[in-house]
Amino acid sequence: MTGASGFLGWHVARQLLDRGERVRVLVRQGSRARELDGAELATGDLRDPASVARAAAGCGVVYHVAADYRLWAPDPDELYASNVAGTRNVMEAARAAGVERVVYTSTVGCIGIPGNGIGDEETPVSIGDMTGHYKRSKFLAEKEALAAAREGLPVVIVNPTAPVGDHDFKPTPTGRIILDFIHRKMPAYIETGLNLVDAGDTARGHLLACERGKTGERYILGCENLTLGAIFQRLSKVAGIPAPSIRIPYAAAYAAGVVSTAWAGITGRPPVAPLEGVRMAKKKMWVRHDKAARELGFAPGPVDEALRRAVEWFRGQEEAWRRCS
């Protein structure tokens, strides 16, 4: 599998190991698969077809969870190299290895959202609806997976929403929101809408997709549609920190994103407010997961417990760092 050194991939690998499965994980040189004792490490890079082929050789199932998940990059071509070409490399390696199943992790960002409603797998969508390089690269990567399925590779696609929980190492953009909330770095916010889901439930959805999913089909793995304000209220309860009460108008947030991103282009440091993230926030990413529930038996629980675990894990990581410093 790919992506085990990241957030969602870690949860998928952990559940496979807990089931007694033999797990081989592709990791880049210098990376490590933390807290995954028992996993076999294969050193390589998604952008290197030969290393991907070596990692896939002898495998029965491939979980392709890895992605370059950044809302800003000094060189956007890096996102396409990892997400699009990397996915093509995984599909080709899986075909050469003769695997029984490929589970490809896409994103809710590739799901169409109607202007006045909630999206699902059948909502029309095109690359023109994709905001920024991350979403565009993932949209094109999903097309690679769908093309492989049409050519006979047994590929099932899952579209996670915004997973939350423990072991968000990097962290992801959603994890960064939680971390900034804990540090009280978010006195105000722009109102938007996200669909949150427990990362552990999302990982179980991957395993269900492997067992029950239909080749060439997409399955949304989500749970609760919430405004950002509602998310902060829930975080306030589990973290014991007041929720921000000031809402920033979209125009003001957009201006801040322009300035922040322009400054990042000069300094090379990630922007505090990526313009791509601000533009994405204009649309509520609300979806339904009825298809996954019906065809996979996907039954996620409430996200409050996952938010609590996320808060406790981030705080525990910071405490461990202080003890070692």
Image (cartoon, rainbow, N blue to C red):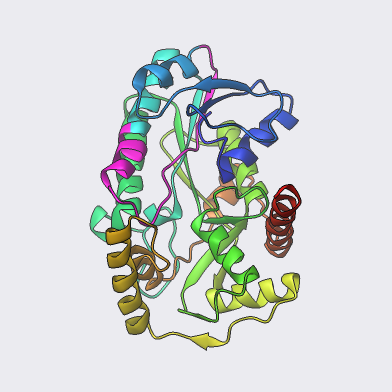
307 displayed left or right of 295: right
136 displayed left or right of 27: left
Q: Residue at x 29, y 72 (%)?
A: 258
Q: Residue at x 39, y 75 (%)?
A: 116
Name the one closer to the observer, 158 or 249: 249
Can you say whether 233 is above or below 18 in the image?
A: below
Can you say whether 221 is above or below 275 in the image?
A: above
- Residue 276's spot in the image, x, y percent? 34, 63
Residue 74 is a magenta residue: yes
Q: Is residue 125 visible?
A: no
Name the one closer to the observer, 54 or 170: 170
Can you say whether 312 is above or below 116 in the image?
A: above
- Residue 103's spot in the image, x, y percent? 50, 34
Q: Is residue 316 visible?
A: yes
Residue 89 is a magenta residue: no
Question: Can you tell which quarter of the image residue 243 is in?
Answer: bottom right
Can you say whether 281 is above or below 221 in the image?
A: below
Question: Can you tell which quarter of the image residue 8 is in?
Answer: top right
235 displayed left or right of 153: right
Magenta segment: 58-85
Name the one closer to the observer, 77 or 148: 77
Q: Residue at x 55, y 66 (%)?
A: 177
